[in-house]
Image (tube, rainbow, N blue to C red):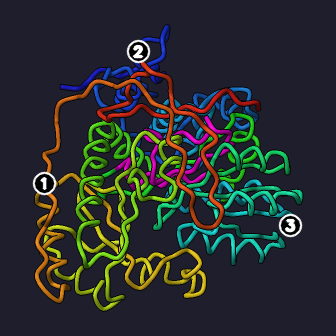
Amino acid sequence: MFAPRAPKVLRMAKIPSDRPLRPATQLVHGGQMRTGFDETAEALFLTSGFVYDSAEQAEATFLGTAEHFQYSRFGNPTTSMLEQRLVLLEGAEACRVTATGMAAVSAGLLAHLKASDRVVASRALFGSCHWIVSTLLPRYGIRTEFVDGGDLQQWKAALTTPTALVLLETPSNPMLELVDLAAVCDLAHAAGALVVVDNVFATPLLQKPMQFGADVVVYSCTKHMDGQGRVLGGAVLGRKKWVEEVLQPFIRNTGPSMSPFNAWVILKGLETLHLRLPAMCRSAAAIADFLAERSEVARVLYPFRADHPQQGLAKAQMAAGGSLVTFDVQGGKEAAFRFMNALRIVAVSNNLGDSKSLVTHPATTTHMRVGAEERAKLGITDGTIRLSVGLEDVADLIEDLSTALDAIAPVQVPTRRPVLPVEAEPVAAPAAEPAAEAPKARRGKSKPSAAPAEAGTPLLFELASPLPEAPGRKG
């Protein structure tokens, strides 16, 4: 039996428009369009091109006087749904998705910059981001300068000179260093710079950089948004004028477009982000506490731990400490490799944000090509290990880590921290307390500029503290 022909028009799904929707609802319904078939799931439009009713309609579409999809390199109904969902989640004006996270970073930078421009970047960047700033941009006559992201005095000194763009990530990969977003955005804007923030580690559920003054936010959707290791994708979010007039022509003509299939998979992944991320954060916090008690571990970095040098700033900007834990094992590379090879549940991989727990050795993988001297400046040693905590039972993960640590211990060291169960039931939001002042730290790290949300702010998801909100900002 043949199905009836559906109307060609796409329409937005019927969701309330008279009140703002909470993040969990946005993650399920945001941006959804339906065809005349009234499908429940988002439609997947696997098509390279689109047809027109007439030559006149085609002409009007290319002139911009008629709205019609032209070619999937320019835009596609499925990728458009993903873009709109991310806009609602981030609180941005516009979004374009890209084939990968690195395509998002490179598009965001190259669309905006020109020869003779100046860029200031946090030294603590993902290896490929570091390569773009240190190696690629200078080839096009773009001057670059690195600063220690946690040192506000270095930002002040670097931004006394006119600057076209500032690039930073917070928390950083892999050392979980924080950047004072509000303070750096103010300095950057005074220098005439566009502020681009890589928010991959925090996700828009834990941190919203635009609330602190950021102009552009970039993501690797490959990580927490898909969250199940299936597809690649990236996203660039910003003001509507910048996205349409600066970014879109670059994407349209250079072609770093996302596949509609990948967009569809990421749309489905987003539906459970508010369930997955809190569980991962709770497990990561418990694992960080466990690791800190092991004598084989020389250092543990987790933003919400009291011994993190920027804990106050982390709590002022983020709703939770995130799903990543970085630590150093005693014995350098040889011990790190023995530890990783002894793991049975946690897999060795350079990905992160997955439902499966993953571990990597930054010095020989993600940050190999930044060089030993630059790794030393970042604090990455041969014993540094980055752990992306997944959705496994935290007790099983701790047992696996404990066994692997025993493999590098001169003597057996028992686990001294009891394994705490992960609560599955939602918890009530407590009254928010003022963020603790960041402990006095090395390299002149500044205290937070932002204040946490007021008491009574609804939770984004099952976490004990609400997402901090920056005060109203100009621009």
Q: Please tell me whether mark 2 sits on a helix, a strand or a loop.
A: loop
Question: For this view, does 439 lie left or right of residue 332?
Answer: right
Quadrant in the picture for residue 78: top left
Going from N to C along the chain, the mark reached first, 3 or 1, is 3
Residue 157 in the image, given as x and y percentages of width and height: 82, 62
Residue stretch rendered in magenta on the structure: 197-226
Q: Are marks 2 and 1 in contact (CB under 8 Å)?
A: no
Question: For this view, does 139 lie left or right of residue 212?
Answer: right
Q: On screen, 13 above or below 109?
A: above
* Quarter occupied by the C terminus: top right
Going from N to C along the chain, the mark reached first, 2 or 1, is 2
- Spatial separation of the CA atoms under disc 2 and disc 3: 46 Å
Picture disc at residue 115:
3
Please state which of residues 226 and 35 is positioned toward the viewer in this rendering.
Answer: 226
Q: Which residue is denoted by mark 2 in the rendering?
A: 15
* Quarter occupied by the N terminus: top left
Estimate how packed mark 1 is, as few (under 14), some (14 to 19) or many (20 or more) residues with alpha carbons within 10 Å.
Answer: some
Three-letter code, disc 3? Ala
Residue drawn at x 29%, y 60% as measured from the top left: 288
Three-letter code, disc 1? Val
Residue drawn at x 72%, y 60% as measured from the top left: 110
Three-letter code, disc 2? Ile
Going from N to C along the chain, the mark reached first, 2 or 3, is 2
Estimate how packed mark 2 is, as few (under 14), some (14 to 19) or many (20 or more) residues with alpha carbons within 10 Å.
Answer: few
